[in-house]
Amino acid sequence: MKVFDKGIRVYGAERCHKTRFYIDFLKKKNLDFVFLDVEKDAEAALELKSLYTTGKLNFPTILVRGKKLRNPRIEELEKWILKKGIKL
C-alpha cells in the first residue's frame, strides 16, 4: 500500500490561513491526520508536486486515503472522509 492510500494527509504551509482552517476542522472532528508543511519539508514538497501534472505546490491539498482534494469545501471534504470509511 502506498503512503498516499493511508489515512488523511494535509499538504500546506503553517503560514497559510486556509491550511490552518483545515487543520482546525480535522482537530475539532478528532480525526487522525498528518500535516506536511511543504515550505519547511523538501520531501513533502516533492510528494505534493508529484500529485499534479504541473509540478506546482498547489496547497492546501488534502489526501483522504488516496483521494486528492484541492482546497475543498467542507461538505466535499466530509463526503470523502465518510466515503473512504473514516468516521466523523
Image (cartoon, helix red, strand yellow):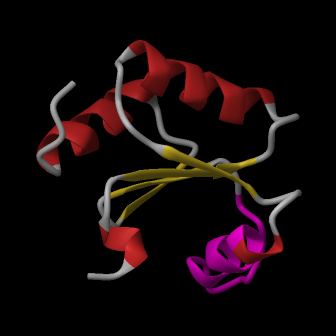
Closer to the camera in the image, 11 or 52: 11
State the image quarter where residue 45 is shown. Answer: bottom right
Relative depth, front residue between 74 and 27: 27
Query: What residue is drawn where x is 35% and y is 30%?
Result: 31
Is residue 85 depicted above or below 11 in this figure?
above
Residue 20: image x %, image y %? Answer: 69, 27
Is residue 24 shown in magenta?
no
Where is residue 46 drawn, in percent x and y? 72, 80
Residue 88 horizontal side relative to residue 73, left or right? left
Quarter placement of the C terminus: top left
Give the side of residue 72 with respect to residue 32, left or right.
Answer: right
Report the number of discs.
0
Give residue 35's position: percent from left, percent from top: 60, 46
Residue 3 versus residue 40 in the image, above or below:
below
- Residue at the image position 35 percent from the left and 81 percent from the top: 2
Question: Which quadrant, please, contains the N terminus?
Answer: bottom left
